[in-house]
Image (cartoon, rainbow, N blue to C red):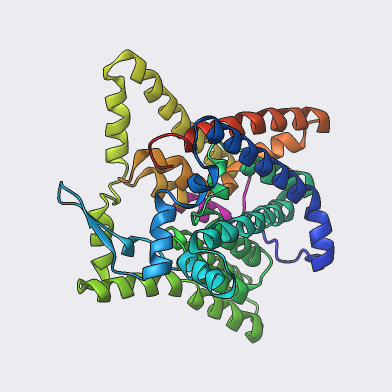
Amino acid sequence: MTDLETRAAPSRAGALRRAAPALLGYAAVRALGLVALALWSAARDKSAYTLLTARWDALWYTRVAELGYGYEVRLANGDVHSNLAFFPLLPWLERLVAAVSPLSYADGGFLVSLFASVAAAWGIFVVADHVYGRRAGVCAVLLWAVLPVGIVQSMAYSESLFTALAAWSLYAVLTGRWVSAGTLALLAGLTRPVGMAVVAAVWAAGLARFARERRSGGAPEPGPRARRVLGMLLAPLGTAGYVLWVGHRTGKGPLGYLDVQAGWRNGFDGGYAFARFVAEKFTSFPSALAGAGLIAGVVSVVWLYVAGVRGRQPLPLLVYTGVVTALALCASSYFGSKPRLLMPAFPLLLPLALALARMRIRRSALVLGSVAVASAVYGAFWLNGSGPP
């Protein structure tokens, strides 16, 4: 891993000024997506705000905020959908917003996602800027904004909140702020099950640092070493705490959360179910095109990860991205959600960001602008569909 901790971090005011182009560009792309959604939804006599705040997972989060845990739905096929599958940080924040304002829980979820998405964009910028420079940071943020599933960043879902916590935790690791990294990893672990990816990144970076110190033969200063240990100890407490609490709540011990996920037909099967789903697409000609598209998508994700390795991305970024990608592609969850589950893996975008940063500004702006329009239209179409994102 490249040792990046020696680079001085800018002041807060200077950091905001440095990130301003990325944040303004991000806001413009998200505004375009929301306008497209509003127009498309109005044409179909639907409420864009309802699509953003009161459908699918957003409803489950607001029910947790309003009623607490214990709500479940029993389906005709015997499956049990329990709200224990949803981690608590977003509902806690929704409840907080509702407690201190006249807003509803759904409004609170939208507000949290709105601010969290900007925080995530800023976090992505500082990571990419720290590793590859300012232009790459701006391009990375805009690429994250124009993802085909970018509309999810504006929904009352937990992806934006998680990405914000993950990105800033990774930045804290890269700049040697170990207690901050561990605290943010703890919070990420209270947001989504994939919080373990942030924990893995913190631990991998910490262990690598210990190994370098041992090889160098010098005696490390006790203060920084203690802060590193504390950060590493804090990091897993969010994920472990909630999983153990669910096990206690269900009476099934440490594996109770896996039983809850099994009720949703979620699990980790190494990608078998996804591979079978893709293979079934080749049984007829029209669906074979979709199957080929899925294979191309997976190959692209793997290629971007390999490009990150060859580009010598820092170890915590590679570990984080690898875990997020493996959990997204190798889980037996609803296949339509896999692009959304990959959205927090923003370091996959860094090789593309570097390529755009090397272009002339006019050409890169044309590329990003064209993709932003396509993303806005697709997001409006996708969110007005029948299935959950």
Is residue 53 located in the magenta-colored stretch of the structure?
A: no
Q: Is residue 263 above or below residue 42?
A: below
Say left or right for 373 vs 254: right
Residue at (59% x, 59% y) in the render? 111
Q: Specify whether 374 is left or right of 336.
A: right
Whether 337 is drawn above or below 314: the answer is above
Q: Is residue 64 left or right of residue 304?
A: left
Q: Specify the quadrant that holds the C terminus.
A: top left
Residue numbers of the magenta segment: 311-323
Residue 151 image offset from top left, x and y in percent: 56, 42
Quarter of the picture containing the N terminus is: bottom right
> On screen, 47 above or below 158?
above
- Residue furthest to the bottom in view is 222
Camera-side residue of 330 and 144: 144
Using the rendered image of the protein, determine whether residue 226 is visible from the camera's viewpoint: yes
At horizontal 80% and vertical 61% (from top left) the residue drawn is: 15
Where is 150 relative to 39, above or below? below
Comparing 201 with 71, the one in front is: 71
Q: In the image shown, does 76 or 193 lie closer to the viewer?
A: 76
Q: Is residue 316 magenta?
A: yes
Q: Position of residue 166 (x, y in %)?
A: 56, 60
Magenta stretch: helix, strand or loop mostly: helix
**Rendering coords of residue 354 (x, y %):** 70, 39
Q: Position of residue 302 (x, y in %)?
A: 48, 37
Kindly identify the residue that appears in the image at 23 percent across and 71 percent down.
250
The mark total stands at 0
Name the residue rendered at 35%, 15% in the picture: 286
